[in-house]
Amino acid sequence: MGKFAKWIGGGLGWVLGGPIGALVGFALGSLFDSSDAVQPQDGGRTYHTNRTAEGDFKMSLLVLIACVMKADGNPKRSELDVVKRFLVANFGEQGALEALGILKNLLKQPIDVAGVAAQINRYMNYSSKLELLHLLFQIAYADGAVNAAELALLQRVAGIFGVRPADFDSLRAPYTKQQDENWAYKTLGIEPSATNEEIKKAYRKMAMKYHPDKLTGLGEDVKKAGEEKFRSVKDAYDYLKKERGF
């Protein structure tokens, strides 16, 4: 497994069971020896640990990236280039190369989106699920716009994750600045009718919700990637402060 040590990071736990486990097994092939293998019990529902390790988060992200790329049919070369730039920016050159090797194998397989999302929902906390969606939005909007099939998939996954509609809109809003004059309000999870005090309160609440420290344990690169959403909350607040003059 040494070849993929940087990407897998702190090891793999619950992703080795369930529908994600089958995908991971194919994608990594013979890299796992017998000591790494998981023998699922209780209908495939018992794994190494319920705690989300760095590797669990990253492999879940790769599987969902594959889902997004396949949402509108066969993945295009241009989409793979977009994903490569995203991976390099967030996880470094070595991590990106390792991830692309796994991703290309994932793209060859049929993926049960609902089953994958349900498994992630069972084991991952809310903050981590929000960060998964945040990273998927980065990819979906990397070429300037999200297509209908990609947006529908993200909404489906968010629904299975139990993500609140306001949080989904908050994640999406920073990418719609050119089309939506209310993007800053949506980023903060409030209505345009909110008072200045309500805006301040919403900013403090959202800053706490998306603080990168909530991603501790998922790896420094994941935590760093989470800083972008944290910054987008501050950008929205600064925009409204200037717009309203408070």
Image (spheres, rainbow, N blue to C red):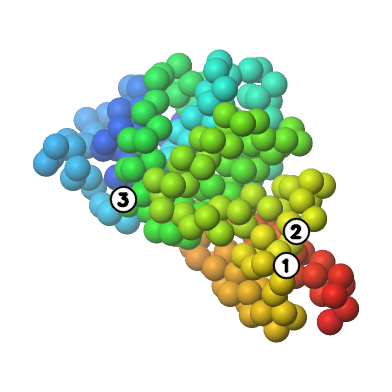
Q: Position of residue 131 (x, y in %)?
A: 53, 53
Q: Which mark is residue 104?
A: none
Q: Is residue 174 above or below residue 185?
A: above
Which dot, 2 or 3, sits closer to the camera? 2
Q: Which mark is residue 182?
A: 2
Q: Give the crowd class for mark 1: few <14, some 14-19, many >=20 residues within 10 Å.
A: few
Quick check: can you spot residue 96? no
Mark 2 or mark 3: which comes first in sequence? 3
Q: Quadrant of the C terminus?
A: bottom right
Q: Give the crowd class for mark 3: few <14, some 14-19, many >=20 residues within 10 Å.
A: few
Q: Give the crowd class for mark 2: few <14, some 14-19, many >=20 residues within 10 Å.
A: some
Q: Position of residue 6 (x, y in %)?
A: 50, 41
Residue 40 sits in which quadrant? top left
State yes or no: discs 3 and 1 in contact (Cβ < 8 Å).
Answer: no
State yes or no: discs 2 and 1 in contact (Cβ < 8 Å).
Answer: yes
Q: Nearer the viewer, residue 228 or 149?
A: 149
Q: CA distance from mark 3 to mark 1?
A: 35 Å
Residue 170 sits in which quadrant? bottom right
Give the structural element (helix, strand or loop) at label 3. Answer: helix
Residue under the point 65% across and 43% down = 138
Quick check: can you spot residue 103? yes
Q: Quadrant of the N terminus?
A: top left
Q: Residue furthest left?
A: 42
Left or right for 142, reference 30: right
Q: Which residue is mark 1?
A: 192
Q: Nearer the viewer, residue 115 or 227?
A: 115
Give the structural element (helix, strand or loop) at label 2. Answer: loop
Q: Which residue is mark 3?
A: 122
Q: How many marks?
A: 3
Left or right for 65, reference 16: right
State yes or no: discs 2 and 3 in contact (Cβ < 8 Å).
Answer: no
Q: Position of residue 13 (x, y in %)?
A: 31, 46
